[in-house]
Image (cartoon, helix red, strand yellow):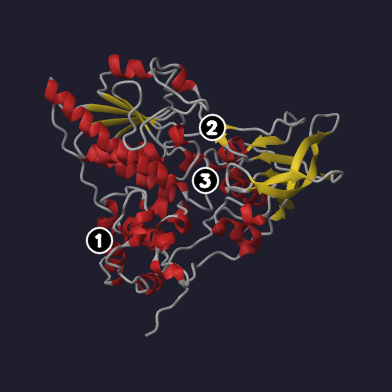
């Protein structure tokens, strides 16, 4: 039988139907599709796909188990290094990581590694995984993890399995960080996927304290000096939104993507009044930006009842940083892309509500520091896009609370914590950091990779500390 050069298609909701609901767009492989996709894997001895995996999953090994119908072995192989496979299988940019190095990608489409990872994780969850609680030693050392996003969850899982008593401190009322507040339900179901994965950590013995704002409820020094923690990991992410700095951004109807998506994802505004968080969405919505967050904002607005949802992006389609899958889904759902367009002001009425977005057309010049061609304003090309809601999705940075309340913790000029790339070691003894709070906004799996490296370094640090006692 000849080898197919194309991936087996992912079953999905029809675009016209899914654009009006918050159910997951991608429906997942059936067993038949999963085995057919697994059969495409060449089982390369050098496993080049692993080179692109930040947590180093043995990809050929778990795919081989799928092919042979051994699902228990497949999930065990993945969970040797990845405690959140159902999440990663859905939201990781596999096309820029593991699948990028797949041999099949040289003359066709790579093996659907992410799709297979999701299939294995969903199969295990539906079957009901047995999680064995850790039997902690009476003198087990204590580790505090600040933030329950991907980096914090990875650290907590790895250290719990090594016998440390881990407590996660989360500022919001539900754990999960960006997995809960930043990524829409239609891409990543919260109750069925995220909270199930987090509850597995609880079953291991990880304690999770919510509504705990470190820097206010406790400082890092208080955790170590008064609460008895032997080490602290900071994984507070990048949750401080950036704005454009143009006139009119304070008008009613202007949201940061962070606020807009948090209201919808974490606080379930799409279920108002069943859930008590209302949200105003007009009939015409402009989302400024071109990344995954911008796609999420535009697609969410459509589902909340907008008649027209625009992506306003100052470069061309070729420079869009969002995943190709998200762009494809957005187009299918009817999102209107305004390329080579830059906002110059938000326009409002005398009551203070948005009535339009003043823009200018752009053209591309020479590449800038990012490697992408620099957008240049075209003279006399101003126009007004008639909208009543504007969502700013041009990035986010670190919240400064932990850094500003922790003596001896060095940061860079952007406010990110300065930490060693391979260990997460900071300038403050016993304090480690990783994920977006160190690198700036990145991907879920890169944050998990940083968390795993930090967990190994924390283990070494605590073993050395114990030996000196």
**In the rendering, at what x and y percent does residue 348 appear?**
82, 34
Using a 10 Å C-alpha cutoff, classify the residue at mark 2 as few (fewer than 14 neighbours), some (14 to 19) or many (20 or more): some
Left or right for 15, reference 108: right
Relative depth, front residue between 404 and 301 = 404
**For the residues carrying marks 3 and 2, which lies nearer the camera in this image?**
2
Work out whether 401 lies above or below 162: above
Q: Which mark is residue 183?
A: 3
Mark 2 highlights which residue? 397
The kind of secondary structure element at disc 1 is helix
Residue at screen point 67% across, 51% down: 302
Spatial CA distance of label 3 from label 1 is 29 Å
Which residue is situated farthest in the front direction here? 366
| 88 lies above or below 29 | above
State which quarter of the image contains the N terminus.
bottom left
Question: Of marks 3 and 2, which one's residue comes earlier in the chain?
Answer: 3
The spot of residue 195 in percent (x, y) is 40, 44
The picture quadrant where one finds residue 224 is: top left
Most foreground residue, 25 or 115: 115
Residue underneath mark 1: 72
* Residue 414 disc label: none
Task: Tell me whether circle 3 and circle 1 mark residues in contact (CB < 8 Å).
Answer: no
The foreground one among 119 and 305 is 119
């Amino acid at each position: 039988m000849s080898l197919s050069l194309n991936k087996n298609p992912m079953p999905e909701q029809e675009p016209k139907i899914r654009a009006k609901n918050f159910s997951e767009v991608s429906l997942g492989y059936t067993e038949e599709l999963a085995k057919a996709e697994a059969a495409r894997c060449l089982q390369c001895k050098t496993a080049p796909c692993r080179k692109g995996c930040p947590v180093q999953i043995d990809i050929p090994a778990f795919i081989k188990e799928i092919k042979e119908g051994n699902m228990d072995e497949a999930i065990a192989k993945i969970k040797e290094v990845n405690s959140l496979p159902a999440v990663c299988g859905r939201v990781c940019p596999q096309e820029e990581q593991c699948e990028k190095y797949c041999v099949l990608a040289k003359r066709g489409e790579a093996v659907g590694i992410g799709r297979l990872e999701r299939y294995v994780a969903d199969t295990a969850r539906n079957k009901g995984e047995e999680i064995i609680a850790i039997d902690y030693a009476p003198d087990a050392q204590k580790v505090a993890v600040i933030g329950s996003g991907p980096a914090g969850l990875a650290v907590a899982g790895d250290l719990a399995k090594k016998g440390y008593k881990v407590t996660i401190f989360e500022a919001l009322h539900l754990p999960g960080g960006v997995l809960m507040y930043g990524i829409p339900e239609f891409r990543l179901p919260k109750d069925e996927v995220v909270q199930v994965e987090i509850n597995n950590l609880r079953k291991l013995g990880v304690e999770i304290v919510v509504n705990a704002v470190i820097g206010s409820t406790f400082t890092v020094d208080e955790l170590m000096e008064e609460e008895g923690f032997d080490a602290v990991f900071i994984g507070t992410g990048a949750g401080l939104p950036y704005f454009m700095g143009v006139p009119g951004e304070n008008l009613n109807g202007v949201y940061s993507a962070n606020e807009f998506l948090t209201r919808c994802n974490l606080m379930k505004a799409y279920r108002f009044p069943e859930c008590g968080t209302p949200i105003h969405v007009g009939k015409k919505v402009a989302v400024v930006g071109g990344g995954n967050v911008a796609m999420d904002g535009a697609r969410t607005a459509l589902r909340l009842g907008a008649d027209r949802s625009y992506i306003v992006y100052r470069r061309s389609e070729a420079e869009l940083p969002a995943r190709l899958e998200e762009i494809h889904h957005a187009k299918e759902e009817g999102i209107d892309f305004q390329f080579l367009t830059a906002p110059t002001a938000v326009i409002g009425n005398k009551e203070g509500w948005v009535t339009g977005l003043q823009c200018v057309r752009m053209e591309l010049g020479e590449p800038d520091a990012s490697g992408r061609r620099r957008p240049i304003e075209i003279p006399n090309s101003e126009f007004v896009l008639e909208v009543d809601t504007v969502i700013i999705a041009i990035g986010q940075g670190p919240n400064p609370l932990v850094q500003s309340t922790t003596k001896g913790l060095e940061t860079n000029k952007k406010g990110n914590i300065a930490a060693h790339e391979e260990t997460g070691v900071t300038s403050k003894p016993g304090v480690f950091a990783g994920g977006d709070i160190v690198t700036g906004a990145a991907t879920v799996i890169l944050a998990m990779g940083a968390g795993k490296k930090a967990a190994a370094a924390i283990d070494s640090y605590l073993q050395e500390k114990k030996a000196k006692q």
